[in-house]
Amino acid sequence: MTDPDTDPDTDPGKDPPRSRVTMKDVAVKAGVSQSTVSFVLNGLEDMRISPGTRKRVMAAAETLGYRPRGAGRPPKPVGQGVIGMMFDEIATSAFAAISIEGAQEEAWKHNIVLEVVMTGGDRDYEAAILRKWAGDNAIGVIYGSILTHAVTPPEGLAQHRAALLNCYDPEGRYASVVPAERRGGEVATAALIAAGHRRIAFISGEPWMEASDQRMEGYERALRAARIPVDPSLIVEGNFLPSGGRLATLQLMEQDPRPDAIFCANDLTAVGCYEALKELGERPGETIAVMGYDDQEIAQHLSPPLSTVLLPHREMGQWCVEAVMRAAGDRPQDRIACPLVLRGSHGG
């Protein structure tokens, strides 16, 4: 399969379509929380949701063409096979939930139940769960991480058909999937260049994180492709949090000449960037462009809505289910493209 991080024929300015309409899309359209959408669409009448809100949610779902999981298919008997999904953390990242939802949806298409555990990285607990799944004759196991990085999988994983989610084994013993972060950084920067910007700054995340380094590599690659020199003074370290985005932006805006666009390594950094720019009397998307990365929920609610890059965690979860169902011995290593989501802040 083609690697979007290295494929020279992929158009960095093209915005790939999303695979399907989600509850999140309906929530944004209706102007309510995703929980409200879930309660309304699942017909929970005992929740105190006004008739007007229910009507708005149903209208948004119809307009967008949202189809609930399993719509149009007859009910399936539960228990026709199990795939185990093991995460180091869940509560600290919204992306874990998105991956779980994608994997669960794909598994249920094949009449398979997904069992999910969080281990906290405890090796003894991982071993115990893997023994349980072996005793249950599980179809396979998805071993996931909230951070993209190299891992040393537990020994017991070798007893299963397995796929690594958002992490990889340097020895290539298992199928694995990660986001195409370099390509995502390149696509985001190319969009800023296409909007006419030339003095483009980059606020990184914490330097030990692979995602931050790879997004910066993509940023530099896009600048070189456009014959724009990489200026080290325009690259400032952040911390993937609003606090780091604010301080880095204030530092960048002291330069003369100042940047005309700021690419933030994630959306939370962009929140801090917006805060600093507004403190300085700037108008994001008008007097200066801002680009984020991740497409977190908050990106749609900033003013103006944040242009960003979508991390394909749903698609990665689906990919892993397909991988564990393939023939034993098939160990593909894949990177899934991170689509550009343009909303308005990248003008400036």
Image (cartoon, rainbow, N blue to C red):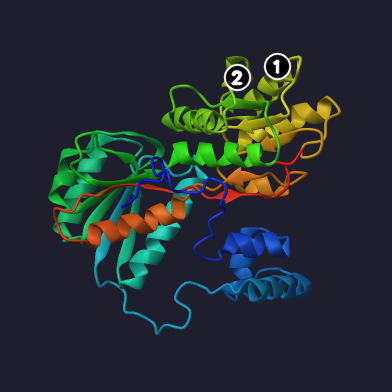
Residue sitting nearer the eye, 324 or 81: 324
Looking at the picture, how far across and down is residue 16, in whole percent? 53, 56
Which residue is depicted at the point 66% across and 69% down? Answer: 47
Q: Residue at x 39, y 82 (%)?
A: 75
Q: Is residue 322 visible?
A: yes
Would you identify the image quadrant in which residue 286 lies? Answer: top right
Rendered residue at 59%/36% (across/down): 189
The image shows a total of numbered marks equal to: 2
Q: Position of residue 134 (x, y in %)?
A: 15, 54
The location of residue 198, given as percent across then percent down, is 67, 29
Q: Amino acid at mark 2?
A: Val
Q: Quadrant of residue 158?
A: top left
SS label for mark 1: helix
Q: Is residue 337 left or right of residue 346?
A: left
* Numbered mark located on residue 251 in the image: 1
Q: Which residue is mark 2?
A: 236
Camera sees residue 293: no
As drawn, 300 above or below 183:
below
**Quadrant of the image occupied by residue 262:** top right
> Looking at the image, which is closer to me, 47 or 193?
193
Q: Which residue in the rendered view is the most extreme toward the right? A: 281
Q: Which type of secondary structure does the marked residue at label 2 adopt?
A: strand
Tag 1 near tag 2, CB within 8 Å = yes
